[in-house]
Image (cartoon, grey):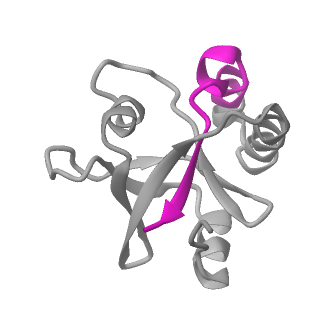
Amino acid sequence: MKSRFSDAVLAAISKDKILGIRAGSGSTHRIIGIWAVVVEGRVFVRSWSLKPRSWWRTFLEDPHGMIVVGKKEIPVRAIQTRSERLKDLVSAAYKEKYNKPGEVQYVKDMSQKKSRDTTTELVMR
């Protein structure tokens, strides 16, 4: 059974535009801000850039990391999403949450196959 985040944590992630994240169990990566959405009570993130040392590629090598919600650091494990149904729901959630003029083009890019294939679920560990 996957560990679930508390309702308060899910609400904060839903409300906040930026989620602090550090990929990998080593502390070589700094905490960065990324976009996150909550779908069916689960937390999902997507990579926009896919650079060689991106958080997403780090999670592929080492699925452990942490997120920062409010002042809390929460240890997480990254699980790559294979479900096309969930990927569709995540795309729709990004479109709904990030709808300001400066965000729309990024959302469009993040709904393309390249970014869509990076859809990652974060679960507590």
Measured as percent of width and height from the top left, residue 69 is found at 46, 71
User: Can you give x and y, in whole percent of width and height, for residue 36 in the image?
Assistant: 59, 51
Q: Position of residue 56 (x, y in %)?
A: 42, 34
Question: x%, y% of residue 33?
Answer: 41, 49
Please name the residue shown 61% across and 73% down the image: 4
Instruction: Report the span colored magenta.
Output: 105-125
Q: Quadrant of the C terminus?
A: bottom left
Q: Nearer the viewer, residue 45 or 4?
A: 4
Position of residue 96 relative to residue 19, above or below, is above
> Hey, which quadrant is residue 45 in on the image?
top right
Q: Residue at x 65, y 35 (%)?
A: 103
How many numbered marks are there?
0
Q: Is residue 28 magenta?
A: no
Query: Which of the 4 image quadrants contains residue 1?
Result: bottom right
Query: Left or right: 100 with respect to 33?
Result: right
Q: Residue at x 72, y 31 (%)?
A: 104
User: Which residue lies most toward the front here?
Assistant: 1
Residue 85 located left or right of residue 104: right
Tell me the residue at 61%/82% (across/down).
6
**113 and 48: which one is in front?**
113
- Magenta run includes residue 115: yes
Of 56 and 79, nearer the camera is 79
